[in-house]
Amino acid sequence: MNVTDALDEEGEIGKYAYILHGNPVNSSTVVICEKFAILHKAAASFGFDESTLFMFVPGIPSAACLAQLKKLKAKRFIYFGDMDPISFYKFFALRQLTRKPQPDGKTKLHVEYGGITLADYDYYMPPNAQMRLNDREKTVLEFVSHFRMPDVKAELAFIRDSSLKLEIDAFSRYGFDNYLKDKLKQNL
């Protein structure tokens, strides 16, 4: 199975739209959220702040989403997502502004990784909150392992060595609001 087939079977490839919360004209920071719950809770905790735009991007970023990102004049772009192979694929798609990022592809948008890290896992995650990778995710893991990723090197090694992933949904049952507030304070 190739990476495109694996992503398609996971329901990640489609012509998904995106949702913006905030003012795309005057924003200095764009927080890109992989899950709608993140967008909703982050936006609610910040209220309406002219300097921060929240963007929900389901699945692999669509052509329309990538075109919108190119238009934004923000100084910072931060990606909040799971600690799993598909989230890392999305992270690189955003950085390269393409639906099909390549390990040797050029970074066209400086996007910081603000998603789940091993430090978050140690501090916030409940015991046994990890989930096993399925075969499609293992295919994507093999592909993203070829990218240079200093931002997520330790996280990728954990996933590769353990075949486990961490999804932000697990936090919703165990203090998600506190976790999200702390993460946003660290990154914004």
Image (tube, grey):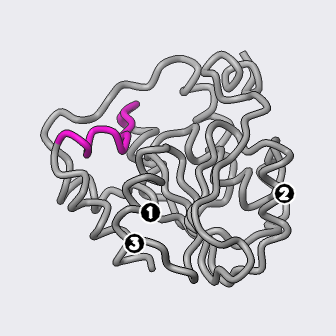
What residue would you read off at disc 3? 46
CA separation, marks 1 and 3? Answer: 5 Å
Using a 10 Å C-alpha cutoff, classify the residue at mark 2 as few (fewer than 14 neighbours), some (14 to 19) or many (20 or more). Answer: some
The answer to whether any part of residue 150 appears in the image is: no
Q: Evaluate if marks 1 and 3 touch, with contact meaning CB atoms under 8 Å apart.
A: yes
Which quadrant of the structure image shows residue 165? top left
- Dot placed on the residue nearer the N-terminal end, 3 or 2: 3
Under mark 2, the amino acid is Gly
Using a 10 Å C-alpha cutoff, classify the residue at mark 1 as few (fewer than 14 neighbours), some (14 to 19) or many (20 or more). Answer: some
- Asked if residue 62 lies left or right of residue 161, the reply is right
Where is the N terminus found, in terms of image quarters?
top right
The answer to whether any part of residue 114 appears in the image is: yes
What residue would you read off at disc 2? 105
- Asked if residue 147 lies left or right of residue 10, the reply is right
Residue 58 forms part of the magenta stretch? no
- Asked if residue 40 lies left or right of residue 149, the reply is left
- Asked if residue 50 lies left or right of residue 167, the reply is right
| Picture coordinates of residue 139, whole percent (x, y) | 62, 26
Which quadrant of the structure image shows residue 10? top right
Q: Evaluate if marks 3 and 2 touch, with contact meaning CB atoms under 8 Å apart.
A: no
| Picture coordinates of residue 88, whole percent (x, y) | 58, 48
- Residue found at x 46% / y 38%: 160
Q: Evaluate if marks 1 and 2 touch, with contact meaning CB atoms under 8 Å apart.
A: no
Under mark 1, the amino acid is Ala
| Picture coordinates of residue 125, whole percent (x, y) | 20, 48
Say the numbered circle drawn on residue 186.
none
